[in-house]
Amino acid sequence: MSKREDGVWRALGLMSGTSLDGIDVAVIETDGERVLRRGFSATYPYSDAVRDKLRASLSEASEIGERSARPGRLGLLEQYLTELNAEAAAHYLADHEIDAASLDVVGYHGQTVLHRPEAGLTVQLGDGGLLARRLGVPVVYDLRAADMAAGGQGAPLAPAYHRALAADISERPLAVLNLGGVANVTWIGESGELIAFDTGPASAMIDDWVSAKLGQPFDAGGRLAAAGRVHETIVADWLALPYFAEAPPKSLDRNAFSLAPVADLPGLDGAATLTAFTAAAVAAAIAHLPVPPRLWIVSGGGRRNDTLVAQIRERVGAPVQVAEAFDFDGDGLEAEAWAFLAVRSRLGLPITFPGTTGIAEPLSGGVTAEPNA
């Protein structure tokens, strides 16, 4: 139950995406249906050492066969990441002069290290109980598990928030495209119908490539891709993979696609080809929608890749705007979504839907950890 008589919750969201760049923090006020107030967001980057540990953990996590298993160093890493999230939240609250006691709930995503919906398996590193004790606030976490147990994909989860956030935008149908480590789209119909799925790769493959081949953590502004040549036959071969013909709902693991097809390309050509693949996969997603979107709103770190956004704009044949054009927070939107989902979880409201994850009927989810437990 909400602590507030007016039914308004103040919620903090913590999000760590598959791009492995850091921890996003945001606070919103909501009644679980409407977004009533949004604050500032902040990002607390992972150090290079943490990022290296996370990349190594992806290999260890590939051996997990049961979602609670933490083989090798994953158990210690989970505790460390939880402490980092507690520190990020504490810094955010201090920087924005917010009393933790004013928060009703925290929505905690954790760090995804494995996502295999075909096996009903998803693993996010994060100890909700430890975080609740550190912050002294109830924490809602493990938001994907109930959906997967009911036969859903467990992702994407942000569509309910996308719909609430875009309530005042008249263009319909509307697409909200998140360019994180993986790209996912939310299609919002005339009457608020939702269809959502992962379109393909986004920043993860590009980041991995430019890090390994060009010594850069990411392709700033898409300048590396702009200087390279796109190998269209490789893009076409990727798009011929079965995933892109599958009807949604569908979702992807961060490492679903191999870099092997570009292994022999020069560094700049690889960046260009991977960027073109991401844009082409977004455009290919239109075939799975009832009506092409009249407007695309782009969030996530990939929106700063000018080459990628320009290619998406060219390929989808409709206006494409970054989140800030609508006063949305392109960096904090996913953290805001987790705050929103935490409130919906506490109220028993659905967070996943047949059109977003493939479950039979709308479903709530999440586990609540109390600070005194």
Image: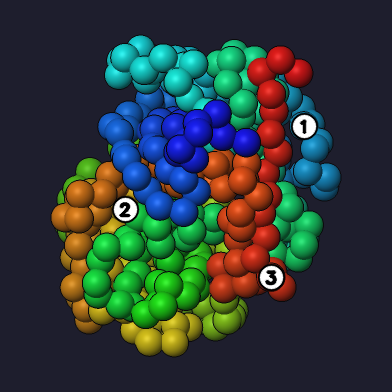
Q: Quadrant of residue 279?
A: bottom left
Q: Which mark is residue 209?
A: none
User: Badge 3 local density, few (<14 within 10 Å), some, or many (20+)?
Assistant: few
User: Badge 2 local density, few (<14 within 10 Å), some, or many (20+)?
Assistant: many
Up-down: is 142 above or below 95? below
If you read the primary sequence from the N terminus, does the residue marked by circle 2 or circle 1 appear first?
1
Residue hosting label 2: 299
x, y percent for residue 127: 67, 26
Please indicate whether residue 338 sits to the left or right of residue 142 in the image.
Answer: left
Q: Which quadrant, please, contains the C terminus? A: top right
Frontmost residue, 205 versus 202: 202
Identify the amino acid type marked 3: Glu
* Secondary element at tag 3: loop
Please indicate whether residue 362 sits to the left or right of residue 88 in the image.
Answer: right
Frontmost residue, 60 versus 353: 353
Q: Which mark is residue 361?
A: 3
Please indicate whether residue 159 sits to the left or right of residue 111 in the image.
Answer: left
Q: Nearer the viewer, mark 2 or mark 1?
A: 2
Spatial CA distance of label 2 from label 3 is 28 Å
x, y percent for residue 214: 31, 42
Q: Is residue 106 something that shows in the picture?
A: no
Please indicate whether residue 231 sits to the left or right of residue 339 in the image.
Answer: left
Residue hosting label 1: 70
Residue shown at the point (81%, 36%) measured from the top left: 69
Q: Which quadrant, please, contains the N terminus? A: top right
Identify the amino acid type marked 1: Arg
